[in-house]
Image (tube, rainbow, N blue to C red):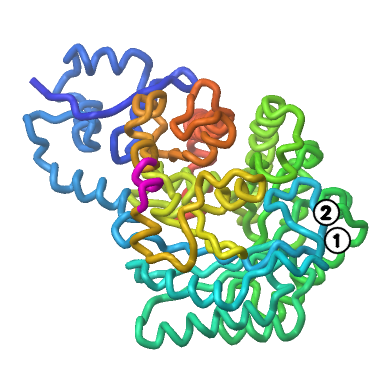
Amino acid sequence: MYKLLPFSFTRIAGHEILVNEVGDMQIVPLGTVEKIVEKQLDEKSDLFKTLHANFFLSDSVIHPLFDIYVERLAEKKSFLDSHTALHIFVLTLRCNQNCVYCQASSQQESNCHVTMTKHTMKKSVELMFRSRSPHLTMEFQGGEPSLEFELLKYGIELAEKRNIGECRQITYVLCTNSINLTDRVLELCKKHRVLISTSLDGPDYLHNKNRGKTDSYNKVVAGIAKAREALGFDRVSALMTTSVEGLNYPIEIVDEYVKLKFSNIFIRALNPYGLATNNENWDDYTNRFIEFYKQALNHIIDLNKRGFFFREEYATIILKKMITSFNSGFVDLQSPAGIVNSVIVYNYDGYVYASDESRMLAEMGDYTFRIGSVDDDYEQLVYCEKVKNWAKVWANETLAGCSDCALKTYCGADPVRNHSTQGDIYGFRPGSLLCKKNKAIIEYIIELIITRGEEVLPIFKSWFL
């Protein structure tokens, strides 16, 4: 008699969806789970052989391919092996825009008291190299980091000098609104192969409204073109944030990215930090965002059907978890959570935070996720009592409402969001709007695979294979 291996299940589009601990998914008819549990499956059937080959059940106490199962599980959690890879340097809160939803609590460009010192930069770079990761990403954020050219240059040169003896693979990323991409900024980026990650929320009427400026769109588009010419198309990417106004334009936003010759878009929801907390109705926003996302994704699928390769990044991350044996590397959908494990933030004020959202909370007066100062020892930061307490609740495999969810392998734990929206780091899944959003999107992707598999699967696989 066969034995059951750990798996969870849910029902979507008239089918049962079985998902095991390594993320393998099987779509089966309704009633299949009952047959599996009641040991009513024919062990000579194709269904039994499929479930056996994919680690849902075993014909012996120990599955004959158990070593492969263990290796695959280890691969899914491999981001833990070398510790923190993403290191965010918040150079300044100074900004030359006035975004209506600013989540970073940016300040006026003239405010000179919200910029990192060279001492803080030096200490931050030293801490970054204390991480064991052979691959380091040094990401510069703000405010608008390009306003601090000398500090940007100083940080990169410090890392380059230190790396002569370290021999790490370093990726530099400048997160910028592209309005201040001067010749010397781009020369620095070209010299050190710095990637440009910019922000574009859609067509001119939407982007300008979100930025609180009448000329922002034209300046951003000009900056993108200038960066592409100096660095190459593949060195410039863009992100969008879905404002309340943006919810009205799913098709137009996608088409704007296509018009500007981007090959992808990352459809991101607002996060409840900074000015975005002024949103009056988060329940309504979440419901509307889910529908907005579905409309945008379907439009992107139609574009691909017409011969335009265009990828939606959030769906790609989920699909990679769903279809391949590899971890996506996206810190927001990791378990254990990405905070500290995958990302650390060195703030302009000399303090160190567990994630980008953690420093956003600090600007709102909440220092829960501050783990220390750049003058502290690395071990003192990453193994402090705060981090040890977070570790008790940062794996969704152990959280009520997550541990028995069939979609947990594709999702992640987020103690920071739980704290900011629900008042405790554990969180309550039935009342979590983040859970509602993630679950709805994952379920919709599975629904598309069930109902339009022959049509969408080749497109989906082209996004990451």
The image shows residue 280 at horizontal and vertical percentages of: 76, 29
CB within 8 Å, label 2 to label 1: yes
- Quarter containing the N terminus: top left
> Which three-letter amino acid code belongs to the residue tagged 1?
Ser
Say whether residue 323 is visible.
no
- Please, is residue 372 above or below residue 170 in the view? above
Report crowding for label 1: few under 14, some 14 to 19, many 20 or more residues within 10 A (C-alpha): many
Is 386 magenta? The answer is yes
Q: Is residue 231 above or below residue 280?
A: below
**How many labels sit on residues?**
2
Q: Is residue 50 left or right of 382 when viewed as pictured? A: left
Numbered tag placed on residue 216 in the rendering: 1
Q: Nearer the viewer, residue 220 or 348?
A: 348
**Which residue is the site of mark 2?**
211
Residue beneath the point at 54% across and 60% down:
351
Snapshot quadrant of residue 142: bottom right
Q: Secondary structure at mark 1?
A: helix
Question: In the rendered view, would you say 13 is above or below 117?
Answer: above
User: Under tag 2, what secondary structure?
Assistant: helix
Q: Predominant secondary structure in magenta?
A: helix
Going by the image, does 165 lie left or right of 96?
Answer: left
Q: Is residue 291 above or below residue 330?
A: above
The part of the chain drawn in magenta is 384-389
Q: Position of residue 229 (x, y in %)?
A: 72, 79
From the image, which quarter does the C terminus lie in? bottom left
Q: Amino acid at mark 2?
A: Arg
Q: Residue shown at 74%/50% (left/top)?
A: 102
Seen as rendered, the residue at the extreme right is: 214
